[in-house]
Image: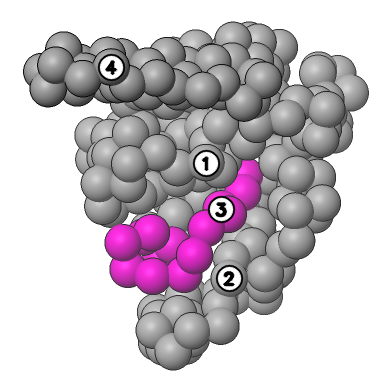
């Protein structure tokens, strides 16, 4: 990812007082948005939900599960779908990204985007979460929903600079491109050895 396009606010440049936490994802049962609402409410942390809600299943989930949990004035706000600029602004100002994922997502780009903004991630241990988030340094990796409450309260103790540095070290676009190229070259080399043919990978640079 390009770090020139992400906002980064180091303390004390972030808003003074209790920061909000943010949920940014598609609306569906596997995203567990309703559990995010319950956890934020129990932790006493303001929650802003920005999510795509256009498909039939997304609309049904919002109408039947999420909307009944929204109570005006209780600190949980539905923002609707956010474009990239608004999404990054929400992340940069957030206490944390709340990511109570309930399926084996292979990566989860929004977690890398949050870290690039200097925002720690509070998530459940599913899919790539343990690979992206360093527990106790760039976020809190929880095994059960009940652990999310305490993690939300402790998210403010984590360093935005540490989150940003970790994202730059691992997810910078040029670095990832070089790593992909290295993997491709390795695959081609193994195929050439196995088949006895001379294969060549042409670099795009």
| 2 vs 1, front mark | 1
Numbered label attached to residue 23: 3
Mark 4 residue element: loop
Quickly name the residue at label 2. Answer: 52
Foreground label between 1 and 4:
4
Q: Could you tell me which quadrant the N terminus lies in?
A: top right
* Residue at x 39% of width, y 84% of height: 57
Residue at the (21%, 20%) spot, across then down: 197
Mark nearer the N terminus (2 vs 4): 2
Residue under the point 81% across and 17% down: 11
Distance from the alpha carbon under mark 2 to that under mark 4: 47 Å
Q: Label 3 neighbourhood size at 10 Å, few (<14), some (14-19), many (20+)?
A: many
Extreme residue toward the front, this view: 197
Magenta residues, start to end: 21-34
Please give the residue where the numbered disc 4 appears in the rendered image. Answer: 198
Q: How many marks?
A: 4
1 or 3: mark nearer the eye: 1
């Amino acid at each position: 990812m390009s770090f020139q396009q992400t906002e980064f606010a180091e303390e004390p440049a972030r808003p003074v007082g209790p920061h909000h936490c943010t949920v940014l994802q598609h609306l569906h049962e596997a995203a567990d948005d309703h559990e995010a609402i319950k956890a934020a409410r129990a932790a006493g942390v303001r929650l802003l939900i920005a999510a795509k809600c256009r498909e039939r299943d997304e609309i049904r989930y919002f109408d039947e599960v999420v909307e009944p949990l929204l109570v005006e004035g209780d600190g949980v706000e539905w923002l609707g779908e956010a474009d990239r600029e608004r999404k990054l602004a929400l992340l940069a100002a957030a206490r944390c990204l709340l990511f109570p994922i309930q399926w084996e997502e292979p990566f989860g780009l929004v977690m890398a985007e949050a870290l690039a903004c200097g925002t720690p991630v509070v998530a459940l241990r599913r899919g790539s979460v343990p690979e992206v988030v360093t527990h106790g340094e760039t976020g809190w990796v929880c095994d059960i929903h009940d652990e999310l409450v305490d993690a939300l309260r402790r998210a403010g103790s984590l360093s935005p600079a540490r989150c940003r540095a970790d994202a730059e070290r691992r997810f910078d676009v040029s670095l990832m491109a070089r790593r992909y190229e290295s993997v491709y070259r390795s695959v081609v080399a193994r195929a050439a050895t196995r088949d006895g043919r001379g294969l060549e990978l042409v670099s795009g640079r």
